[in-house]
């Protein structure tokens, strides 16, 4: 615990009325309590649902300041947030989803959360009212950024998901604070596809100059209901860029629907304070400081300036972190939602035949490759046997049982690999050009172990390491690549990486049956049905011999002694801030 922290006494938790501060603190909050998190991020926008705003730092803050209908929990499954409302399928023909807010929900400025906020989330996420014929791909500037014309109602949403299948305007029940969203067909992400990313009353104020919040909301609703192109363009412009923030930002932009609200933005970080109007599960700690620090200062600040940090694991910091844990700090090796893989080209070169790929995969001493790549962190990183499921989840276990990975590639077999190479007509000593990023310690170490392990089976690994991995991949002429890939969070992600012709498919080949399973998964509404279809996809990938999962990609989350109930969540964002309301200080 930071030495400067004042003692916290349990009796302080009683309700204290603060003059000039609006509502009193929630009874759970201990007045004066605080924690500080060493942070590599930066708050640039309070609209983390936009393409430009979906940065790690903005998502960290959004996890504490924006309520959503459901989110991924610790075990990797979807957890409904009944504090915000309920989501249910109300019709199959057409497929219709109802988003129903709780009656007492409100923004931190006291304005109700209602159907206007839902309707704004719908129009932004779906782009259903965009001008016919507008192609955002034609509005990309030289830097690769989307530049939306001023008169075009296009919302630059980071992920549209199932809302892209919107089929007509929602039915709105303003009294019940709900909307019914019709779609052209069922979608797997029906519980999460609609985000209340920004408040409708703030959008109405910025777009139309209307100060009264309820009138501003109504102006947004009216513009959407009549599909007014000029007013929709003004709304879209605000949604896209109007929530960019800086240390001089008007506090009117910083209203929150979550357990915390942004109190201050500085060059060196962000201050969050408990949201006094939050109707859900409230925190115990009043103030959370996100302290911006460079990577090389994070560990040194732990225990003195900050209470928790997240750092990239290196051989150099393994021992200092070990020493911190011996002094009482808590270490969690948190998965980032990506894995290291070896992927093989099936569309060219010596690995075009399945038998040749099988031979190479049987020749690889995977445990040695992972250990060499992970270095001092090998025990924490751990291997993975799936390219689709996060380790420790139910889907991962079922994939292990059904995909055939353990039987196919679980153990190296040099003798079998040599025999398969001969059967495939590949001469002994044949070189495989392996591309990897030289600047990535894992990839460089993994390649060295891979090259050393292949010789016994008559293969040779040609060092095709590159300083610019993307450029080298685009150049072509390679046979295999050591690369980190994100675990999919949607069927669209699976299609991009493992489907035929997928934009991120490095293997160069696909499989019609796999494509069908992916497409079907996108239309299933039950998580277990989606899981089972993805297991079919994994089985196809294993059988084709185009990818060898190596290890999880991790970060080291280190929490000083004296901070309780910190449970970092595996995934690509908000690993520390997702459960700030559960953080606690010891009773004294």
Image (cartoon, helix red, strand yellow):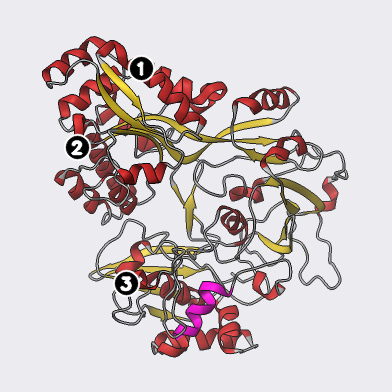
The front one of 290 and 11 is 290
> What is the x, y in percent for residue 404?
24, 27
Relative placement, left or right, of 187 versus 552 is: left
Tell me the mark number nearer the camera, choosing from 2 and 1.
Answer: 2
Which label belongs to residue 348?
Answer: 2
The reply to whether dot 3 and dot 1 touch (C-beta < 8 Å) is no
**Is residue 472 magenta-colored?**
no
The reply to whether dot 2 and dot 1 touch (C-beta < 8 Å) is no
- Residue plotted at (47% across, 65% down): 195
Q: How crowded is mark 1: few (under 14 residues within 10 Å), some or many (20 or more)?
A: many
Task: Say which residue label 1 marks.
Answer: 365
Tell me the mark number nearer the camera, choosing from 2 and 3.
Answer: 2
Q: In this view, does 70 lie above or below 425?
A: below
Q: Give the range drawn in magenta.
A: 232-242
Q: Distance between the residues labelled 3 and 1?
A: 49 Å
Q: Is residue 431 above or below residue 31?
A: above
> What is the x, y in percent for residue 40?
65, 47
The reply to whether dot 2 and dot 3 touch (C-beta < 8 Å) is no
Q: Distance between the residues labelled 2 and 1?
A: 24 Å
Q: Is residue 238 above or below residue 165?
A: below
- Residue plotted at (46% across, 28% down): 444
The front one of 499 and 136 is 136
Which label belongs to residue 166?
Answer: 3
- Residue plotted at (20% across, 33% down): 349
The tally of labels here is 3
């Amino acid at each position: 615990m930071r030495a400067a922290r004042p003692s916290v006494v349990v009796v302080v938790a009683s309700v204290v009325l603060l003059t000039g501060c609006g509502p009193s603190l929630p009874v759970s909050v201990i007045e004066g309590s605080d924690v500080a998190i060493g942070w590599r991020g930066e708050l640039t926008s309070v609209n983390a649902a936009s393409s430009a705003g979906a940065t790690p730092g903005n998502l960290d803050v959004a996890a504490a300041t924006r309520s959503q209908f459901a989110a991924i929990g610790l075990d990797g499954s979807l957890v409904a947030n009944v504090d915000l409302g309920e989501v249910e399928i109300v019709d199959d023909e057409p497929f219709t989803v109802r988003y129903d807010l709780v009656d007492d929900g409100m923004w931190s400025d006291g304005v109700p959360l209602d159907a206007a906020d839902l309707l704004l989330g719908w129009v932004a996420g779906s782009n259903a009212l965009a001008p016919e014929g507008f192609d955002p791909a034609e509005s990309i500037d030289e830097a690769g950024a989307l530049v939306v014309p001023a008169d075009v109602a296009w919302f630059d949403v980071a992920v549209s998901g199932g809302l892209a299948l919107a089929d007509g305007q929602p039915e709105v029940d303003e009294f019940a604070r709900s909307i019914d969203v019709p779609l052209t067909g069922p979608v797997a992400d029906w519980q999460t596809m609609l985000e209340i990313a920004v408040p409708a009353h703030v959008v109405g104020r910025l777009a139309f100059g209307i100060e009264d919040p309820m009138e501003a909301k109504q102006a947004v609703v009216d513009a959407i209901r009549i599909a007014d192109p000029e007013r929709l363009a003004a709304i879209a412009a605000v949604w896209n860029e109007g929530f960019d923030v800086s240390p001089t930002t008007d506090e009117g932009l910083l209203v929150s629907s979550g357990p915390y609200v942004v109190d201050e933005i500085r060059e060196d970080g962000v201050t969050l304070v408990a949201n006094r109007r939050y109707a859900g599960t409230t925190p115990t700690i009043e103030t959370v400081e996100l302290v911006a620090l460079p990577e090389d200062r994070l560990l040194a600040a732990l225990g003195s300036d900050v209470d928790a940090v997240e750092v990239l694991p290196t051989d150099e910091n393994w021992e200092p972190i070990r020493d911190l844990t011996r002094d009482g700090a808590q270490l969690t090796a948190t998965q980032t939602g990506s894995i290291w893989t070896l992927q093989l080209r099936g569309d060219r070169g010596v690995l075009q035949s399945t038998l040749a790929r099988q031979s190479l995969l049987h020749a690889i001493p995977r445990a040695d490759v992972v250990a060499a790549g992970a270095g001092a962190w090998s025990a924490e990183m751990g291997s993975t046997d799936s390219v689709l499921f996060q380790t420790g989840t139910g889907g991962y276990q079922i994939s292990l049982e059904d995909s055939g990975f353990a039987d196919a590639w679980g153990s190296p077999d040099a003798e079998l690999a040599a025999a398969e190479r001969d059967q495939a007509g590949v001469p002994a000593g044949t070189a495989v050009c392996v591309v990897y990023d030289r600047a990535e310690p894992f990839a460089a170490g993994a390649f060295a172990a891979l090259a050393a392990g292949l010789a016994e089976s008559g293969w040779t690994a040609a060092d095709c390491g590159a300083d610019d991995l993307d450029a080298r991949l685009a150049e072509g002429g390679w046979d295999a690549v050591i690369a980190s890939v994100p675990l999919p969070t949607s069927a669209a992600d699976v299609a991009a990486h493992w489907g035929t012709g997928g934009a991120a498919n490095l293997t160069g080949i696909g499989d019609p049956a796999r494509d069908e399973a992916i497409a079907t998964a996108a239309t299933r509404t039950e998580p277990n049905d989606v899981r089972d279809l993805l297991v079919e996809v994994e089985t196809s990938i294993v059988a084709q011999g185009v990818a060898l999962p190596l290890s999880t990609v991790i970060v080291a989350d280190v929490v000083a002694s004296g901070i309780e109930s910190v449970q970092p969540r595996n995934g690509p964002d908000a690993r520390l801030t997702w459960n700030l309301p559960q953080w606690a200080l010891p009773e004294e």
